[in-house]
Image: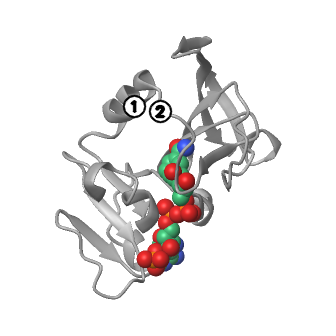
Amino acid sequence: MNLIVAVDRSWAIGRDGDQLCYISADLKRFQALTTGHTVILGRKTLATFPGGRPLKNRRNLILSRTPGFAPEGAQVFSGLEELLAEAEEDSFVIGGASVYRALLPRCDTAYVTKIDAAFPGADAFFPDLDADPHWAAAEEGEPLEQEGLAFRYVTYRRVK
Ligand SMILES: NC(=O)c1ccc[n+]([C@@H]2O[C@H](COP(=O)([O-])OP(=O)(O)OC[C@H]3O[C@@H](n4cnc5c(N)ncnc54)[C@H](OP(=O)(O)O)[C@@H]3O)[C@@H](O)[C@H]2O)c1
């Protein structure tokens, strides 16, 4: 399984229930990589999407234990194993923090957008893959810049 995430220098991913920033080139890359695939996400990440609606042109598998939560165009699961039984091998875990944490051990490729900035007040974090011996950076893109933010795409793979 794959995961895709945008992190800052401290591997922070969110603040007050939202993303730290929006970089349009990164959003385009997210669309290109995930379109046509299954995406796996938590209820709180779904709430950050426009209108709280599932992503188009993707099968949306949502984790939630909230009774009666049934957004149109998505399948809701109250447990990880139940969800994993439905997920294809080429699915993408797309957040947030609790879902990344739970499913990182099931992933073997991580598409990480590393933003060269420190966002004060961040309250959601992704595990530091540079400090995790089970993961290694396999491909590092060149430094990019947009909207005053420097970033690069790094693909990590699970060490066999
Ligand atoms: N930078 C990035 O790439 C990126 C990507 C995605 C999200 N984010 C950020 O991450 C933050 C949200 O992360 P989060 O951890 O607070 O929320 P989250 O993981 O998106 O959603 C948490 C919710 O998912 C459900 N859930 C999680 N694990 C479950 C399990 N094992 N079984 C059943 N339900 C489960 C629960 O829903 P119920 O409460 O309904 O039971 C839980 O409250 C936001 O700031 C968001 O912007 C960043």
Contact check, label 2 and label 1, Cβ < 8 Å? yes
Find residue 98 and report its horizontal and vertical position in percent. 58, 65
**Figure quadrant of residue 52:** bottom left
The image shows a total of numbered marks equal to: 2
Left or right side of 130 for 81 = left
Q: Any mark on residue 125, and which?
A: none
* Residue found at x 31% / y 74%: 76
Find residue 8 and report its horizontal and vertical position in percent. 67, 35
Q: Which residue is mark 1?
A: 27
* Residue found at x 80% / y 46%: 133
Q: Nearer the viewer, residue 114 or 102?
A: 114
Left or right side of 122 for 73 = left
Considering only order in the chain, which callout, 1 or 2, is on the residue closer to the N terminus? Answer: 2
Q: For numbered disc 2, what is the local secondary structure? A: loop
Find residue 29 and report its horizontal and vertical position in percent. 39, 27
Q: For numbered disc 1, what is the local secondary structure? A: helix
Q: Which residue is mark 2?
A: 22
| Residue, far bottom | 67
